[in-house]
Amino acid sequence: MGCCGSVERTKREWRPLEDRSCTDLPWFLLFTVFCVGMGSICGFTIVTGGADRLIFGYDSYGNTCGRRNEPIEGISLTGLDHTDRKFVFFLDPCNIDIVQRKIKSMALCVSLCPTEELKTYQDLKRFAINNDSELCSYELAGHKYPSLPERFSKCPKLPVPPSKPLPVFNRCTPVDISCYAKFAEAVVTFVGDNSVLHRLIAGVAASKEIIIGLCVLALGLSMILMVIIRYISAVLVWILTSLVVLGSLAGTSVLWWLYIDHQLYGNDTSAKATKEEVEVSNDSGQALLVYAVAATIFTIILLLLMLFMRKRVALTIALFHVAGKVFIHLPLLTLQPFVTFLALLLFWIYWILVLLFLGTTGNPVQNEETGLTEFRLTGPLQYLTWYHAVGLVWISEFILACQQMTVAGAVVTYYFTRDKNRLPVTPILSSVLRLVRYHLGTVAKGSFIITLVKIPRLILMYIHNQLKGKENACARCLLKTCICCLWCLEKCLNYLNQNAYAATAINSTSFCTSARDAFVILVENALRVATINAIGDFVLFLGKILIVTSTAFAGVLLLNYQRDYAEWLLPLIIVCLFSFLVAHCFLSIFEIVVDVLFLCFAIDTKYNDGTPGKEFFMDKALMEFVESSRRLERVVERGRSRVKEAVTQGAEMKPMAPGTSSA
């Protein structure tokens, strides 16, 4: 990796982009070993035949289709030569166990899938003779199918639907999927009957061009919104802040009005009401009083926060303005969601394939319930699945952390380059190269910490779902509390990790040192952080809602040509989900940029004051904010000095007390 070690400076100093050294090298080596282990699991499944059994398929006796097989001890009808039998045929393909997600039907290796419906055992006999493909168990002779007593248990369920093999996995699947209606109905819970499911699928198929167009629209709106926020950030933030304050005042006033109205007119009707109605009326009055008092306290706290944080709202506006400039200077930042999604998609596909390989790897075991042969991992090998599951979480978090480090490195380069015309030709590529060369260990360590919190939360969620309806109220409350606490801890660690990556990009320090330095900076600017997160996140959330509603409105107009509501409901839902996903991905990048800019700004103002030798790095918009803050501080300081001077002069002019004059 071009690294030989990592030596921290004994005295902590912020020297942005001055020198680079490897950080957290042991964690990089640990992550590399872990990834080698993940690859070894894939190799193990291939060597032991699990991959072959998944791709080529195997019958219920443990024979792999399309291969010459070795006999398995203790299981009959094994060791058969299936070189000419390349397809897997299920005697009852619709017999699916929804809970265990398995096909419980007996499977056989056949030479040809039946392309026409076979209604009788004579048809089975004719198909076996004409195509040399027997559809009953191997010990049964094809020409005797109609007269054999075993035909009811070891031959396919009649009628045999026409089927065709899957392109890669060589399984004979029914051409008409109507036999899966119950399965689809169980999965899609809102579908009441099979006709509705067919209409929904038909609506998606008929509207595929419109769906693609609307998804592209959502993509364009997300990219445009990030640029527009730069120009309307001031108006947008102040309008939203005013609306929140006015809404809180209006809500509090309405609650007090309802309470007063209840007190004035509720007593007039209480004389004619029954005892139960009087009690209900009193309870309603008390509830209104509690709501009104709570709303008043909330409004007072909100007004005080707005009063004390009004200057910091201006910082949020300035950061949004500078973030818009960052995207103009670094337009390739908009491609980061695509790159990250592609990397995650490729890894998830690989992970699912290896998981399926593991499902067909191990020792052959005969299922006592069904009599079918299954392959299961036994002994220490059964922990390979757990290792593989941990790899899903850690490597996924690692990929997301690489995105955060890449964006942070590019933004840091932009911020701490005084002459923006002298930026690197490709700041994002330079950030990626720095990440790969120096900081993969830091990213691995940060993502591992998130994994340590996420895995227990997922386990508790699984236990909670498994015990649903069985546990008592106390256990249910305890589980939900633990899940909620772990979720909050995960969110806090995610935010701290993101700032730690930015600190590493600035000063090339290890993860723990960067996290500590970033935490100190954030604590010193706690009110600013709270303001930026509260207002900034709210603005970006409204931006996501704006994109979704705009896309949905366009979708209603375009899909309105298909008058049947049931046909374009599902396409509209798909478009809305995709538009929210796209908006979330893009505006999350914008949020990362704002957070990194704030950390850079806080460091800049802490260690520089604008004097020669300590010039600021910040943008003009942030400089204007600093100057206005200094002017306000000077005005406040002059006011304080005048008050002190007036107090001093008053003390000097105070007359002497009687009896203290000199003789």
Image: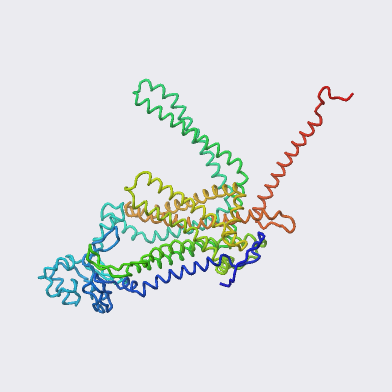
Q: Residue at the top extreme?
A: 271
- From what the image shows, is residue 343 above or below residue 478? below
Which residue is at the front of the view, 243 or 646?
Answer: 646
Which residue is located at x 58 percent, y 39 percent?
A: 304
> What kind of colouring is applied to the model shown?
rainbow
Q: Using the image as rendered, state which of residue 601 and residue 467 is in the foreground.
A: 467
In the rendered picture of this protein, how many numbered marks are placed on residues?
0
Where residue 277 sits: x, y (%)? 35, 26
Q: Position of residue 61 (x, y in %)?
A: 24, 71
When asked about the image quadrant of residue 647, the answer is top right
Point 38% across, 68% down: residue: 354
Please state the horizontal and vertical placement of residue 189, each as a whole percent of the image: 30, 52
Q: On the rendered structure, is 548 left or right of 523?
A: left
**Image quarter in which the N terminus is found:** bottom right
Q: Quadrant of residue 472?
A: top left
* Residue 137 shown left or right of residue 13 in the figure: left
Work out which quarter of the rendered image holds the C terminus and state it: top right
Across and down, in percent, residue 52 comes to: 33, 74
Residue that sits furthest to the left in the current view: 147
Quadrant housing residue 183: bottom left
> Is 535 rendered above or below residue 78?
above
Please identify the residue farthest to the front as the structure is shown.
379
Name the one closer to the observer, 498 or 595.
498
